[in-house]
Image: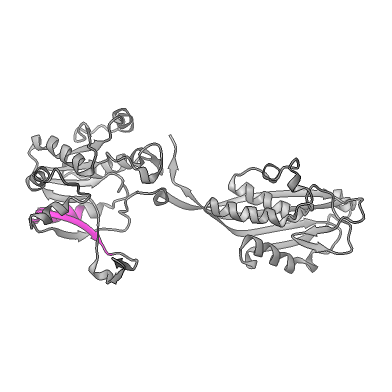
């Protein structure tokens, strides 16, 4: 009993973003359309596979599948303007092979576990005319503004399996209508649809966030300033004014601690250095309060879908005694970056009379930060 598969891959994927349709994007080292095809080729019961692709992507398709040498992968067909059109075109092509059953699968459900396909196959083998994998939602469900029980709602997935002649004739009969779910056609004709267990891993790639993953990144920051010869210059370290101490020379308030933190955050984000974002040539940066740089970094972290997990700063100087101010410094940094104080460590070191700081010429600071960021599991080709 020949089983054929239709891989629906003719969509433009506009919700995923501009450019190459998502089924042809390299995600996690492979292409969704290729991963889906390879899934079905791994089953001996599959006699043939036809992919429906967008017009103009024949060469891209050929390049992706140049290493696949399996006669069961038939030539692709150019899909239509709607998903239902693409399925109907593919079904017509495979009708010449007189299949008994067909599995219709969305190419961008490329993480489908094998057991889901096996569940559909076994249900068809047991006499079902139409089979769909389903899962229960985990979120609360509201319909038309009213809550409904989650136990009464199921989410449909693919592959959906059918007796070939049944679904082929239905697609011909209702060709003027648009359906995103093939099993809906069976319901119009009161044909029983058998439900089997799907899986949450069998998600459909729709938005870029669907292929995002969290990664840890580390950034290193450093800054140093000489003491100022101007008596009225004040000393600021990690947003805290240190009274009765010689200030540092710099374009802004010369807060080496904050500057090193900002530089480390920018480094972790791969966003250059503090000088690129706050150039000395800009009049607004002259005598600027460095805490505004922290606000800028906070906004940048949000924009880049990242969050700080740890900050470790070392301030090197003979004086002042950093430990006396560390608690208040942590409170300031935590407030402006909106992170827990427990994720911040600030410590002071001396050079025991050696080097730039030991000669009492100035103060330096180094910072290491760790961030957790959502990044696309996507390799641009």
Is 6 located above or below residue 141 in the figure?
Answer: above
Q: As rendered, which of 187 and 364 lies closer to the eye?
A: 187
Q: Residue furthest top?
A: 59
The structure residue drawn at horizontal position 90% and vertical position 51%, both measured from the top left corner, is: 359
Q: Give yes or no for residue 130 being in the magenta stretch.
A: yes
Of the pair 252 and 313, the residue shown nearer to us:
252
Q: Quadrant of the C terminus?
A: top left
* Residue 41 visible within the image: no
In the image, what residue occupies the spot 15% across and 40% down? 88
Where does the magenta region start and end?
118-136
Q: Nearer the viewer, residue 92 or 367?
A: 92
The quarter holding residue 90 reads top left
Q: Is residue 243 left or right of residue 6?
A: right
Res. 79 image quadrant: top left
Relative side of 299 to 260, left or right: left
Q: Quadrant of the N terminus?
A: top left
| Residue at point 26%, 51% (across, down) | 114
Residue 183 lies, with reference to residue 277, above or below; the image says below
Question: Where does the image place residue 5, in percent across and percent down from the top left?
Answer: 18, 43
Please tell me whether residue 115 is drawn above or below residue 331 in the rendered image. above
* Res. 105 visible in picture: yes
| Residue 116 position in % (x across, y down) | 23, 54
What's the residue at 32%, 53% (across, down)? 203
| Position in image of residue 320 (x %, y %) | 85, 62
Q: Position of residue 233 (x, y in %)?
A: 87, 55
Residue 220 shown in magenta: no
From the viewer's perspective, is 289 left or right of 308? right
């Amino acid at each position: 009993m020949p089983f054929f598969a239709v891989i629906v891959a003719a969509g433009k994927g506009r919700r995923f973003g501009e450019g190459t349709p998502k089924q042809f994007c390299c995600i996690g080292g492979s292409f969704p359309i290729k991963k889906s095809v390879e899934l079905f080729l791994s089953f001996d019961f599959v006699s043939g596979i036809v992919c429906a692709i967008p017009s103009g992507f024949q060469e891209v398709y050929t390049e992706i599948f140049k290493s696949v040498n399996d006669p069961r992968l038939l030539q692709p067909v150019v899909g239509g303007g709607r998903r239902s059109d693409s399925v109907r075109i593919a079904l017509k092509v495979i009708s010449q092979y007189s299949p008994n059953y067909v599995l219709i699968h969305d190419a961008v459900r490329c993480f489908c576990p094998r057991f889901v396909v096996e569940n559909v196959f076994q249900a068809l083998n047991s006499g079902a005319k139409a089979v769909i994998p389903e899962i229960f939602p985990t979120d609360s469900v509201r319909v038309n503004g009213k809550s409904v029980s989650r136990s009464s709602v199921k989410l449909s997935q693919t592959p959906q399996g059918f007796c070939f002649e049944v679904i082929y004739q239905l697609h011909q009969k209702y060709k003027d209508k648009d359906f995103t779910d093939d099993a809906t056609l069976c319901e119009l004709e009161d044909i029983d649809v058998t439900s089997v267990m799907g899986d949450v891993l069998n998600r459909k790639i729709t938005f870029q966030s669907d292929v995002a993953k969290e990664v840890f990144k580390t950034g290193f920051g450093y800054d140093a300033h000489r003491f100022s010869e101007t008596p009225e210059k004040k000393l600021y370290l990690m947003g805290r004014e240190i009274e009765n101490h010689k200030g540092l020379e710099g374009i802004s308030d010369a807060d080496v601690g904050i500057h090193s933190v900002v530089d480390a955050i920018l480094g972790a984000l791969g966003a250059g250095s503090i000088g690129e974002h706050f150039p000395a040539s800009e009049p607004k940066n002259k005598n600027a309060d460095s805490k505004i740089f922290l606000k800028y970094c906070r906004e940048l972290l949000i924009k880049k879908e990242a969050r700080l997990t740890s900050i470790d700063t070392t301030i090197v100087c003979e004086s002042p005694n950093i430990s006396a101010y560390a608690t208040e410094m942590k409170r300031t940094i935590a407030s402006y970056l909106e992170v827990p104080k427990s994720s911040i460590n600030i410590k002071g070191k001396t050079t025991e009379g050696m080097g730039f700081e030991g000669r009492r010429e100035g103060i330096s600071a180094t910072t290491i930060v760790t961030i957790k960021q959502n990044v696309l599991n996507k390799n641009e080709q």
